[in-house]
Amino acid sequence: MGQKVNPLCLRLSISRDWASRWFTPSKKQFVKNLKEDRLIRELLTKELSSAAVARVVIERSAERIRIVIHTARPGILIGRRGENIQRLQDAVLKIVGTSQQLKIDYVEITNPAVEAKLIADSLAFQLEKRIAFRRAMKRAVQQAMDSGAKGIRVICDGRLAGAEMTRSEVYRAGTVPLGTLRSYIDFATGTAHTTAGCIGTKVWVCRGDLVPLERQKAQARQRPAMEPRAPEAAAATS
């Protein structure tokens, strides 16, 4: 069988959290919130196309909305004296209404070379600029492995280099165990709009295995008993 399961959905609550965190028992309110979340993400994706945004998390409470933007370029997001943040806040308030208290935060991505979304968008941008796809894919794979990734797989599909027929090119390095739930797998897609048509990019990045919380607690409980005592303390007890 083919790989038909989204790696992110498969690992929800295991190594991945939801991008929208809220609950409502009303079906009408659920539809309204879902539509607003989609409009907010489309707005932020369009306005922050040059800010290297990897993820947008939306949290809702009774009368409060908090938006957390994961970006590799916080300076572009904030703008001069916070002008961009204020402009984005005004645009989002037009979608959700002024009755809601809105707060926009950001989280800086310190290692963008292993973020699947940033890699996919970077490949799409380079393909639009007519950079050789093989060179761009090899560079992305090499940078990810040099930055600490355990494995990466990159696929470009479409009329590559303006060819008459569509084809797929795959480059991989390391291990990407999609069937292992304890592995932290990051997945993202991107689209390059070229003169020959759309070229799709897919990126899988493996950052290693997760240590279960129970194992961490067990190791923390065993560590004090296993640590050797200081010479002074040993002499005092003898």
Image (spheres, rainbow, N blue to C red):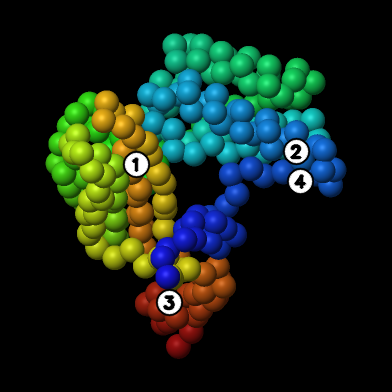
Tags 4 and 2 in contact by the CB under 8 Å rule?
Answer: no
- Residue annotated with mark 1: 200
Q: Which percent across, then down, holds residue 80?
A: 44, 11
Quarter holding residue 218:
bottom right
Please tell me which of labels 3 and 1 falls first in the chain.
1
Q: Identify the amino acid type marked 2.
A: Val
Residue of label 3: 227
Marks 3 and 1, Cα distance to the nearest angstrom? 53 Å
Q: Nearer the viewer, mark 3 or mark 4?
A: 4
Mark 1: secondary structure: strand
Decide: few, some or many residues near mark 1? Use Cα within 10 Å; few <14, some 14-19, many ≥20: many
Measure how far apart labels 2 and 3 are at the Cα level.
Answer: 55 Å
**Disc 4 or 2, which lies upstream in sequence?**
4
Residue 106 in the image, given as x and y percentages of width and height? 51, 31
Q: Nearer the viewer, mark 3 or mark 1?
A: 1
User: Of label 2 and label 3, which has the lower sequence position?
Assistant: 2
Sooner in the amino-acid sequence: mark 1 or mark 4 = 4
| Residue 187 coordinates in the image, percent (x, y) | 41, 51
Quarter of the image holding residue 51? top left
The x and y percentages for residue 105 are: 56, 30
Disc 2 or disc 1, which is closer to the eye?
Answer: 1
Of residue 118 and residue 124, the one placed in the foreground of this image is: 124
For the N terminus, the image quarter is: bottom left
Give residue 82's mark. Answer: none
Q: Is residue 236 left or right of residue 192?
A: right
Secondary structure under the numbered disc 4 in the rendered image: loop
What residue is pinned by disc 4? 23
- In this rendering, would 21 be left or right of 173? right
Q: Which of the marked residues, 3 or 4, is nearer the chain's N terminus?
A: 4
Q: Which kind of residue does numbered mark 3 sit on?
A: Glu
